[in-house]
Amino acid sequence: MKRFAFYIAVLLLTFGFSTAITKIYFVWNIEFWEFGRGSFATCGDFDSGFKGGGGFVSYQSYDGIKLAFSRAGFDTPKIARSCFQSELQKATKIVERETLNDEAGERIVAVFPPNEYVKTEWARIMILDEDRIFEITSSSLRHALIFEKQRREK
């Protein structure tokens, strides 16, 4: 009987230890799973129609935080920069700003106010690369930055 109790104790300790290690792993190494794809048009006005279009991929982390990666292409770098600037004016706070590619590109990390789609503040990483804009959006700035870092390393 003592041997049986010993085996049960070892089994429970092993299970508890493996569960704790798994939780620690996911706290430090956030993983994202894809759950949707789509296309969109951006930077439109009613007079001239939409100026750019592209696609997006939606992700969700293990802890339930959702984010989206999107990209949009434009006819010229001038139109892309105009769209980039108009979107940036909606930000409530700019966290980071840096120039990329010899002044041809720019990377912005910003916080935006709630809107009709998102009921809380949300983070957006915007990258202007000549005639394209790449974006990562999420309700969590931390998750958006981790996602960006993971994708840059791949």
Image (cartoon, rainbow, N blue to C red):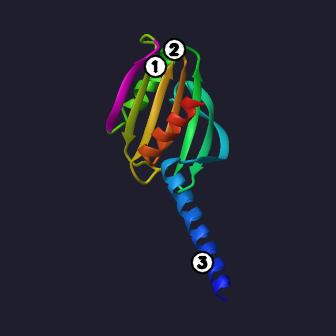
Q: Decide: marks 3, 2 in contact (CB < 8 A)? A: no
Quadrant assignment for the C terminus: top right
Marking on residue 77: 2
Q: Is residue 5 above or below residue 19?
A: below
Q: Which of 40 and 106 is in front in this view?
A: 106
Q: Decide: marks 1, 3 in contact (CB < 8 A)? A: no
Residue 24 at x, y percent in the picture: 50, 56
Disc 3 residue type (three-letter):
Ala
Marking on residue 81: 1
Q: What stretch is highlighted in magenta?
A: 93-101
Q: Decide: marks 1, 2 in contact (CB < 8 A)? A: yes
Q: In which quarter of the image is residue 153?
A: top right
Q: Which of 131 and 7 is in front in this view?
A: 7
Label 2 element class: helix
Label 1 crowd (10 A; few <14 / some 14-19 / many >=20): many
* Secondary structure mostly taken by the magenta-highlighted segment of the chain: strand
149 with respect to 10 (left or right): left
Q: CA–CA distance between discs 1 and 3?
A: 63 Å
Which residue position holds label 3?
Answer: 9
Magenta-span inclusion, residue 144: no
Q: CA–CA distance between discs 3 and 2?
A: 66 Å
Disc 2 residue type (three-letter):
Pro
Asked whether the viewer can see residue 42, the reply is no
